[in-house]
Image (cartoon, rainbow, N blue to C red):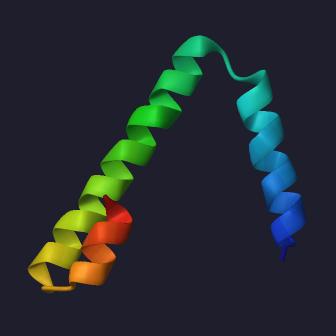
Amino acid sequence: MISAQQQNKYLENTIRTATPSQLLIMLYDGAIRSCKQAIDAIQKKSHRMRIQAL
């Protein structure tokens, strides 16, 4: 299993070497993931999780 430091380094490298279109896709993927988490939190009536997701 990789450590948090190794994972952060990998993500940092991925972002630094990404093309503008890849960065845009990463942005949309993150936004979609956050929206899905917020929808799930709303359905579970978890206001704290909803606020964190948004």
Q: Tell whether 39 sits left or right of 25.
A: left
Residue 14 percent across, percent down from the top left = 75, 35
Please tell me which residue is depicted at 32% across the width and 78% down the height of the picture.
49
Q: Residue furthest top?
A: 20
Relative to 38, does residue 23 appear above or below in the rendering? Answer: above
Please tell me which residue is depicted at 57% across the width and 25% down the height of the picture.
23
Please tell me which residue is depicted at 89% across the width and 60% down the height of the picture.
6
Relative to 17, does residue 34 appear above or below in the rendering? Answer: below
Q: Tell whether 47 sits left or right of 29.
A: left
Residue 3 percent across, percent down from the top left = 87, 72
Relative to 11, does residue 19 appear above or below in the rendering? Answer: above
Image quadrant holding the N terminus, namely bottom right
Q: Tell whether 25 sits left or right of 17.
A: left
Relative to 10, does residue 23 appear above or below in the rendering? Answer: above
Image quadrant holding the C terminus, namely bottom left
Q: How many marks?
A: 0
Residue 20 percent across, percent down from the top left = 59, 13
Residue 46 percent across, percent down from the top left = 21, 85
Q: Tell whether 43 sits left or right of 38.
A: left
Please tell me which residue is depicted at 26% across the width and 55% down the height of the picture.
35
